[in-house]
């Protein structure tokens, strides 16, 4: 029986399907360390895509990661506020992580507050309206990273990692596809998948449908070398 289970699990990995985010994290942590290529102070895999079958099983429980739910939830609440200023995150979490301080402009605003991005030009409201009006729409997408903004100086310190988020209704379920230009597995993926799965839940509730699958695609999925060193030292 154990052999059969192992075969089934291996087939699922070959099909790039995982039950939950923690299973995907653990798989790609090992895969990057073993097979990643050296790329700009990281080991990286290119053009990685996979399904998460239970998106709301979004807690990262890997013992090496020591992921903090309270921070991920604070980040989600910050996104929900639509306030791009890091002071709002500090209000919600009790402190502002150093990475956000480094990414903020002189006024404390960041481009990588995804809630601010999906509220720009009413993107999220438009997506929900599209899905309600035409369940077969292929246009229910939210744009986040926009290369046309580079010359405006928006991305000098803070370049959003997510290209876009798209929603599709299939067989009566609300599915999501998250497309990343670059994704740090250790910090980025863990918190991103939490917030985007919560967004999937929000949209599913608005359109009155159950939650389907979460598809995650990263052109560059990586671990920084200092993180790999810490893992190898344990």
Image: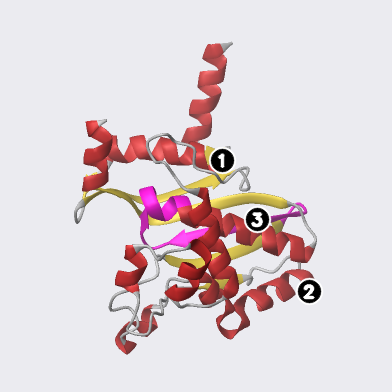
Which residue range is magenta in the image? 170-190
Q: Earlier in the sequence, mark 2 or mark 1?
A: 1
Quote the CA–CA distance across marks 2 and 1. 31 Å
Task: Say which residue appears at 33% left-offset and 64% top-offset.
Answer: 99
Judge depth for marks 2 and 1 and give the one in front: 1
Q: Earlier in the sequence, mark 3 or mark 2?
A: 2
98 horizontally vs 136: left or right: left
Badge 2 crowding class, 10 Å Cα cut-off, few under 14, some 14 to 19, many 20 or more, is few
Quote the CA–CA distance across marks 3 and 1. 15 Å
Residue at the extreme bottom of the image, as rendered: 152
Q: Quadrant of the C terminus?
A: top left
Per the rendering, the mark at residue 56 is: none
Q: Are marks 3 and 2 in contact (CB under 8 Å)?
A: no
Q: Which residue is mark 1?
A: 20
Q: Which residue is mark 3?
A: 175
Residue 82 counted in the magenta span:
no
- Quarter of the figure with residue 172: bottom right
Q: Nearer the viewer, residue 109 or 206?
A: 109
Q: Secondary structure at mark 1?
A: loop
Report whether residue 9 is seen. Answer: yes
Task: Say which residue appears at 42% left-offset and 77% top-offset.
Answer: 146
Task: Say which residue appears at 40% left-offset and 66% top-offset.
Answer: 96
Q: Secondary structure at mark 2?
A: helix
- Quarter of the figure with residue 8: top right
Q: Secondary structure at mark 3?
A: strand
Q: Nearer the viewer, residue 87 or 200?
A: 87
Coordinates of residue 181 in the picture (x, y in percent): 38, 63
Report whether residue 16 is seen. Answer: no
């Amino acid at each position: 029986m154990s052999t059969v289970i192992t075969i089934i699990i291996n087939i699922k990995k070959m099909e790039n399907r995982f039950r939950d985010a923690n299973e995907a994290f653990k798989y790609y942590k090992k895969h990057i360390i073993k097979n990643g290529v050296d790329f700009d102070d990281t080991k990286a895999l290119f053009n990685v895509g996979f399904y998460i079958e239970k998106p709301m099983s979004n807690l990262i429980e890997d013992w090496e990661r020591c992921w903090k739910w309270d921070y991920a939830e604070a980040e989600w609440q910050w996104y929900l506020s639509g306030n791009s200023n890091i002071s709002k995150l500090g209000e919600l979490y009790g402190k502002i992580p150093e990475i956000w301080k480094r990414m903020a402009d002189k006024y404390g605003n960041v481009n990588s507050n995804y809630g601010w991005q999906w509220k720009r030009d009413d993107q999220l409201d438009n997506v929900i309206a599209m899905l309600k009006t035409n369940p077969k729409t292929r246009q229910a997408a939210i744009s986040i990273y926009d290369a046309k903004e580079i010359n405006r100086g928006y991305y000098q310190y803070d370049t959003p990692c997510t290209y876009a988020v798209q929603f599709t209704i299939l067989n009566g379920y609300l599915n999501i596809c998250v497309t990343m230009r670059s994704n740090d597995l250790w910090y980025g993926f863990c918190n991103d998948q939490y917030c985007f799965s919560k967004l999937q839940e929000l949209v599913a509730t608005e359109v009155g449908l159950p939650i389907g699958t979460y598809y995650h695609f990263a052109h560059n999925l990586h671990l920084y070398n200092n993180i790999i060193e810490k893992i190898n030292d344990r």
